[in-house]
Amino acid sequence: MQNGGLKPMDAEQLRENAHKMVDFIADYYKSIENFPVLSQVQPGYLHNLIPDSAPHHPESLQNVLDDIQEKILPGVTHWQSPNYFAYYPSNSSVAGFLGEMLSAGLNIVGFSWITSPAATELEMIVLDWLAKLLKLPEDFLSTGQGGGVIQGTASEAVLVVLLAARDNALKRVGKNSLEKLVVYASDQTHSALQKACQIGGIHPQNFRVLKTDSSTNYSLSPDSLAEAISCDLTIGLIPFFLCATVGTTSSTAVDPLLALGNIAKSNGMWFHVDAAYAGSACICPEYRQYIDGVEEADSFNMNAHKWFLTNFDCSALWVKDRNTLIQSLSTNPEFLKNKASQANMVVDYKDWQIPLGRRFRSLKLWMVLRLYGLENLQGYIRNHIQLAKHFEGLVAQDLRFEVVTPRIFSLVCFRLLPPHNDEDHGNKLNHKLLDDINSTGKIFISHTVLSGKYILRFAVGAPLTEWRHVNAAWEVMQDKASALLARLSIE
């Protein structure tokens, strides 16, 4: 503040306060294991701690940091804790953080090439880099008819390709045929597809959720898909979109891409592959096999912000034909017209996404790739998979538990077996065990349901997790299981 005026971006003030903020964040990471992983607060806790109106006069940064320490952090679930094993990881790293910091500092809104040429061109280059690491078909590179784009999440990615596929299909069969369009997926597909269908106007009765079971390790059966398509064709419906998954949310099931892709192609359908979680592992040659068949896909998605050390949000989407996407999402208002865009000399990413505005997200992915390199990133992935394999072995040694599905990547699905094989109480038993484990604050895990059974999920992927954390987590689970079974025997 000078001469009574506000100077919101003063270079020296930034230098001073940013140093304090970096120190605060670094201290947070040094002490992160001291916090309960899952926040233990009750709903509405913060309303009693924060004033009900904004301040009239400025406060010091130190006062704000004190409030963060005392009031905000107790209400944070610590996704970066080495004892976080829930859902799927949301990686942070020094490189990702630095890229995010630089993006915030430049603070550009790069909706078209002219608004910051570097933002558009770096995104194209970095996604080509990543596509090559994954050995994606050349059709997905920006040098051809396709290309990559960073979306916020996999939910946005599946929405934009569904809209492109819908409009492309309606051009072919007539714009009045929306009510006949059918979408196919398994019952393990992420719920984001259902939301995309709702937004895209797909009739709810035309969203085919095909059942999976343990006989295929919960992957989508090509025979089941072919039968469903045949039935729909018989009654005059129009199959137009198939979503396959590499690494499902519940159990990391891997759908057979080649067989499914061939069925989609023979029926003129758009084939989308969701590898949001497991796509990162496919930079390792030994795991690349799980996306074999991706050459049949029209679009492919992986979240660099899950398991690739790139701070949220950074969801990489590639399409084989960018024009289909652009035709569906493009607008060209007068106030955005410019020479480069009008001459079709450049990519304008506003036409590849739902919103107009977009951040300089490629900086953090570029930083991760440059500061770590392929060899270190592969080692990082392999270490987590080894930790999960170790945990799987611990579970297998305790006869009170069972591993429910084969472990492929870094997720282990398991459960506590009910005494006397009483399956009626098995779900309640494991639900109670989950609550008992998470209420300790020492670790955080989540659950799913497979074939009607309540299953516990142990997902290794936090950047700070080491062997000792996995061993300690298993001790917590064993202790809580012993206490729970002891209570049941008394009752």
Image: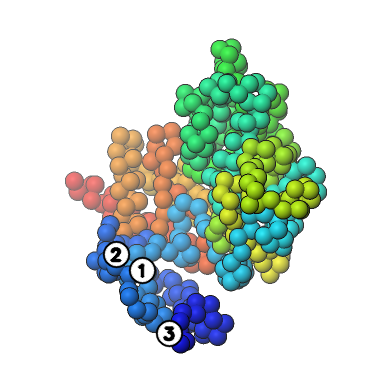
Residue under circle 1? 72
Q: Is residue 219 visible?
A: yes
Q: CA distance from mark 3 to mark 2?
A: 33 Å
| Rendering coords of residue 349 (x, y %) | 66, 51
Residue under circle 2? 46
Sequence-first disc among 2 and 1: 2
Residue under circle 3? 4
Determine whether, in the image, residue 434 is placed left or right of residue 237: left
Residue lying at 41% horizontally and 47% vertically, measured from the top left: 447
Residue 102 position (above or below residue 224): below
Colour mode of the rendering: rainbow
SS of the residue at dot 1?
A: helix
Hey, what amino acid is under mark 2? Leu
Determine whether, in the image, residue 80 is placed left or right of residue 442: right
Residue 181 position (above or below residue 359): above
Mark 1 vs mark 3, foreground winner is 3
